[in-house]
Image: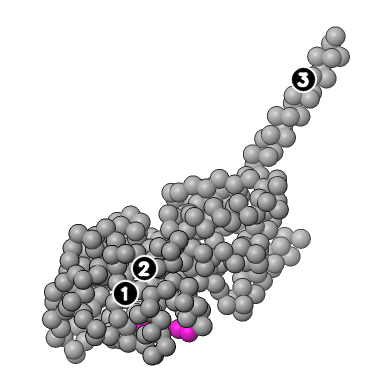
Amino acid sequence: MRKSVFTIALLLGLQVSQSAGAQNEQVTLRVQHSVRPLVEKWVAEYTKINHDAAFRIVTGKATNTEHQISFVTEQADDAVFVARYAVLPVVTKSSEAAQLLGSKRLNAKKLKSLFFVKDEFDDDTKESKAEQALHIYTGNSQQSASRAYAQSFKQETSSFKGKKISGDDSFLNTALSRDPLGIAINSLSNIFDLQSRQLRSDLAIVPLDIDKHGEQILDEARLDDIILLLEQQQFAEIPTGKIGLSYNHHDGILNQFVRWILTDGNKYVHEYGLLELSQKEVTAQLRLTEQQDLAQK
């Protein structure tokens, strides 16, 4: 009898130990709203071939949790980059803002003048009629696409004119819908319907002064054509930012998942309005994870 009780207790102890071990292997993914659908897709596809993998997706600031990856949209020393996002200026269709801008195409210099406060060394201090009348809206979160836009124009986010909207960048669309003189900058995933691949019904892309082929692509406003264009060409008028993964590079479990994202998971980024990295960039990012594995050995 005592032997049976001892055996049962031992088995229960092993089960508890195994459960605790499995819990410790769980990967925590800290994501912002804009990339959560893509991350959920990555998890679903990864666990199909790695049945023992366990994930939980959370929001908020990073903690010291073991096996944790934080998704970042700004430069970070330890980040491995996995995709890019593009930022465009938009207004609501048939609004006063759209009428003020008309068909006039804006180049990089005019965009900088429109969205940012002029510094004291700027000789061209006269504002156009549109600049005086338009109401500028930009995001104010750490993950906002506005940060990549400011960086591209060598500006601080504090230099943006107008009103800064807290929370997710999707709230910028709400701000525009309430202000006929509003103009905002936002990422492709927020200004396009990811199902129809068309612009959201109430939005219009501000005409940009780029090459004829690029102008035609923007005018036709088909998401997949714009993604292809921006993967092949770079324009000062269309800033792009990178999505990176910040994590402990000495963690083999995390490195394995990140390598899968770079080699297999990248085929899903278009579906969610993002741009793939070039093959050269992918190779460089893979090398970062491999070097850490070698150092650990």
Horizontal arrangement in the rendering, residue 253 relative to residue 168 (left or right): right
Along the viewing direction, whichever of 194 and 252 lies nearer the viewer: 194
The answer to whether mark 3 and mark 1 are in CB contact below 8 A is: no
Q: Residue at x 70, y 47 (%)?
A: 51
The answer to whether mark 2 and mark 1 are in CB contact below 8 A is: yes
Tell me the crowding category of disc 2: few under 14, some 14 to 19, or many 20 or more residues within 10 angstroms, Cα based: many
CA separation, marks 2 and 1? 9 Å
Mark on residue 9?
3
Name which of mark 2 and mark 3 comes first in the sequence. 3
Q: Quick check: can you spot residue 49?
A: yes
Q: Mainly helix, strand or loop, the magenta region? A: loop
The coloring applied to the image is one colour
Mark on residue 138?
none
Along the viewing direction, whichever of 187 and 259 lies nearer the viewer: 187
Mark on residue 205?
1
Part of the protein shown in magenta: 233-237
Q: Which residue is mark 2?
A: 199
